[in-house]
Image (spheres, grey):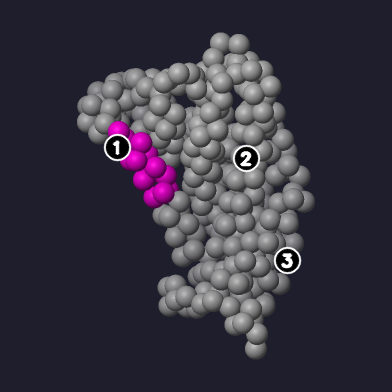
Amino acid sequence: MSEVDTGVEEQVGGEGVEFRLIRVIVVKVLQESLRDRWFWLYTIGFAALAASLTLVAIPDSSVVLSGGFGRTGAALVALVQLVVVLMAISLGARVLPSERESGSLAFVLSQPIGRTEVLLGTFVGLGGALLAALAAGFGVAGVLSTLRDASVSASVLIRLTGLSWLLSLCAVAIGLVIGVSQRKVGAATSTALFVWFVLVFLGDLGIMGSVLASRLPVESLFLAAVLNPVEAFRVAAIVALDGSLDALGPAGTYAVDTYGDRVGLIGVGVLVAWVVAPLTLAWLVFRRGADL
């Protein structure tokens, strides 16, 4: 038996996980993403919106002003909160139900490959596809800024791309929880849209309503806001781009006064938790699934 065939194994949850099999699923997911019209629609739409926002904002400010948070940076952060979260959560929710309906999931699992490898490979593959989409969108923004003689820092775009990718991984993990719980693509997509709406819109509105109704103390307001992965991304992005958290109101002022420079790390930590927890839940549900 060749060295490639033997693979690399690690005990996870009491069962052997072969990383060569995960690589097979990663390649499969990446290839399918290139053939997925929804992936291309999201990617082209994100790149077009990033380009449009950059062109609109350039006359007044560059991506990041000298020592401050520019209009383009703020616009790109808002774009990520809306479009990237929708793209990632819907793709994550659709992939497994789609394979169930086509019968390809049953075929894959009939081979010597476990559910853990399938789920991890799907997650990594979608993460790779989304990283490419984000790099394309922010790359277009950077090129246009350069062509328009605006000051652009490559490190700024790299930091924003990295944080956006981390947020997209959170959304993919949440989408996979939906996907392993639904058998039909239509039901999974509808659920994903509802969850996206709750995270992006109702999160802010719910916090505002709670403040008005119960007069939450500012520390509770900050905690309620930062536990939402979308808001945690915004906090981390503003800090990473040297912006002022005063834009977040009293909660932002409290965060800076209490945690200082660590507030960005808090946002990143919340995002990492939102990757690990939903992915673990998806794994627990998927590995116990009896039917396809």
Give the labeled residue for mark 3.
Answer: 103
Q: Is residue 20 visible?
A: yes
- How far across and down, in percent of the image, does residue 66 sit? 45, 18
SS state under label 1: helix
Give the residue at x 43% y 40%: 229
State the residue position of label 2.
135
Labelled pair 1, 2 in contact (Cβ < 8 Å): no
User: Dot 1, how many residues are within 10 Å of its Cα: few (below 14), some (14-19), or many (20+)?
Assistant: some
Q: Nearer the viewer, residue 206 or 75?
A: 75
Residue pictured at 36% horizontal, 33% vertical = 225
Label 3 neighbourhood size at 10 Å, few (<14), some (14-19), many (20+)? few
Over which residues does the magenta segment extend? Answer: 261-274
* Residue denoted by label 1: 262
Q: Amino acid at mark 3?
A: Gly
Foreground residue, 278 or 129? 129
* Residue 82 magenta: no
